[in-house]
Each structure stands twice: as structure tokens, then as C-alpha cells.
Amino acid sequence: MSVHPPLTPTPQAPAPGAVTPEHDKTDPPHVRSFPSTVGGYVYLGVLTAAIVGLGLVGFGHWRVGIIVLAAGVGAASLGRAVLRTKDAGMLAVRNRWFDVALLALTAGALWILAVSVPGD
């Protein structure tokens, strides 16, 4: 028994070095550029909050940035709690309530960090 692929091309697969015509390399016309679920839009909102929050941290406003980041993670937790698994999109990673608890604990820890550290 050999673990190597056959050296001769099969009728189903092209040869390893086969060149496809240029017109076959274009994307099909049905490719969409928007999320297919409501959870996709929530995920984009959370991603935006994370980018804005980390940007604020980078520019020296760490407390406000961490609060914005905590709000984004809290919104992800709320979205995961409300949306069905098939509508949650990329928010659905594990069991629903495990995701909700983990995101809520992370948001709470970030918020506690931002409000309890002394300083400016």
C-alpha cells in the first residue's frame, strides 16, 4: 500500500502543473460581501468596538479604551444570549450558555479593571 498520490493524472483531477485558462480564475457572480446572519452584524460591531478601544488605548486613553472594549464584549455576550445558534454566526463557538458566561465574565473583568485601577 502506498501513501503517495498517483503520478498519472486521473480523469477527475487535473495534472499537478496544469494551467487553468484566465477566464476560469474569476470569482463567481454570486459572491456576497455582507454577513449572512444577524450575528455577523453583531460580530462586526464587536470588532469595530475592539478596534476603536485598542486605538484609544494606543493613543493614551487607556481607561476609556478598556471600557469601550468591555462594552463590545458585553454586546457580544448579549447577542449570543439572544440569537439562536444558526443566527449567531461567528459568535457561536461553543455551547450557547458557555459562550454567554465567558463573554460576560470577560466584559465584567475588563470593566472592573478600567474603573478600579487608580490614576488619571
Image (cartoon, rainbow, N blue to C red):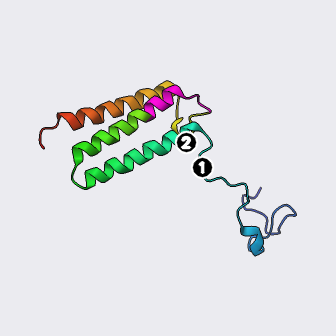
The prevailing secondary structure element of the residues shown in magenta is helix
Per the image, label 1 sits on a secondary structure element best described as loop
Residue 20: tell me if it is visible.
no
Question: What residue sits 24% from the left and 32% below the top?
Answer: 112
In this view, the residue in front, 6 or 9, is 9
Please provide the residue range marked out in magenta: 76-86
Give the residue type that dot 2 points to.
Gly
Residue 77, percent from left and from top: 44, 31
Residue 25, percent from left and from top: 72, 68
Q: Quadrant of the N terminus?
A: bottom right
With 33 as the anchor, is 13 left or right in this view?
A: right
Residue 115: tell me if it is visible.
yes
Q: Are marks 1 and 2 in contact (CB under 8 Å)?
A: yes
Question: What residue sits 45% from the left and 35% below the top?
Answer: 76
Residue 117 quadrant: top left
Residue tagged by mark 2? 40
Labelled disc at residue 65? none
Residue tagged by mark 1? 34
In the current view of this chain or complex, which residue is farthest to the top?
A: 97
Q: Quadrant of the C terminus?
A: top left
Give the residue type that dot 1 points to.
Phe
Is tag 1's residue or tag 2's residue first in the polypeptide sequence?
A: 1
Q: As displayed, is residue 74 above or below residue 54?
A: above
